[in-house]
């Protein structure tokens, strides 16, 4: 796939994504990333046989996963925004 075709596809998909709310995007992907982080951590502890890593209240563990997931979501969102604006700028011939 050529760069121009990939850029057009990205612009189309990101414009569709931008039609929705930013809050909905962050909620959806924060929940998804929280689950992924939880499962990855669980498998890591099972593989290392360190399931009991000391006392940490369950709410603190949940908040830790949610905070990490929110930061990952924000990084992906703002990276996508940057790529969107950069690609639009390049397609307009580099004119502001």
Image (cartoon, rainbow, N blue to C red):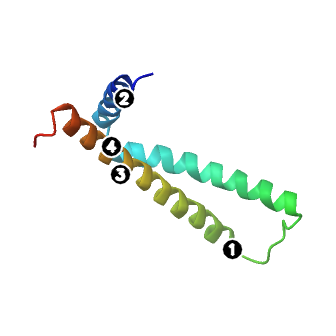
Real-space Cα separation, disc 4 to disc 3, in angstroms: 8 Å
The residue labelled by disc 4 is 83
| For discs 1 and 2, the disc positioned in front in the rendered view | 2
In the depicted structure, whether residue 40 falls above or below residue 1: below
Real-space Cα separation, disc 2 to disc 3, in angstroms: 15 Å
Work out whether mark 4 precedes mark 1 in sequence or the reverse, and give the earlier one.
1
Q: Is disc 2 in contact with disc 4, using a CB cutoff of under 8 Å?
A: no
Real-space Cα separation, disc 4 to disc 1, in angstroms: 40 Å
The residue labelled by disc 2 is 13
**Foreground residue among 10 and 73:** 10
The residue labelled by disc 3 is 78
| For discs 4 and 3, the disc positioned in front in the rendered view | 4
The residue labelled by disc 1 is 57
Real-space Cα separation, disc 1 to disc 3, in angstroms: 32 Å
Q: Residue furthest right?
A: 49
In the depicted structure, whether residue 56 falls above or below residue 91: below
Q: Is 42 placed left or right of 50 in the picture?
A: left
State the SS at label 4: helix
Residue drawn 37% across the image and 44% down it: 80
**Foreground residue among 4 and 49:** 4
Residue drawn 19% across the image and 39% down it: 89
Query: Would you identify the image quadrant in which residue 61 lies?
Result: bottom right
Estimate the x, y position of residue 60 in percent, counting from the top left: 62, 71
Real-space Cα separation, disc 2 to disc 4, in angstroms: 12 Å
Q: Is disc 4 in contact with disc 3, using a CB cutoff of under 8 Å?
A: no
| For discs 4 and 1, the disc positioned in front in the rendered view | 4
Estimate the x, y position of residue 37 in percent, counting from the top left: 64, 54
Work out whether mark 4 precedes mark 3 in sequence or the reverse, and give the earlier one.
3
């Amino acid at each position: 796939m050529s760069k121009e075709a990939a850029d057009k596809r990205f612009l189309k998909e990101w414009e569709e994504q931008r039609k929705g709310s930013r809050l909905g995007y962050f909620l959806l992907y924060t929940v998804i990333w929280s689950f992924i982080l939880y499962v990855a951590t669980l498998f890591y502890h099972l593989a290392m046989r360190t399931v009991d890593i000391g006392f940490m209240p369950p709410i603190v563990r949940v908040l830790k996963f949610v905070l990490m997931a929110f930061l990952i979501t924000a990084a992906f969102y703002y990276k996508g925004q940057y790529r969107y604006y950069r690609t639009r700028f390049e397609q307009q011939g580099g004119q502001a």
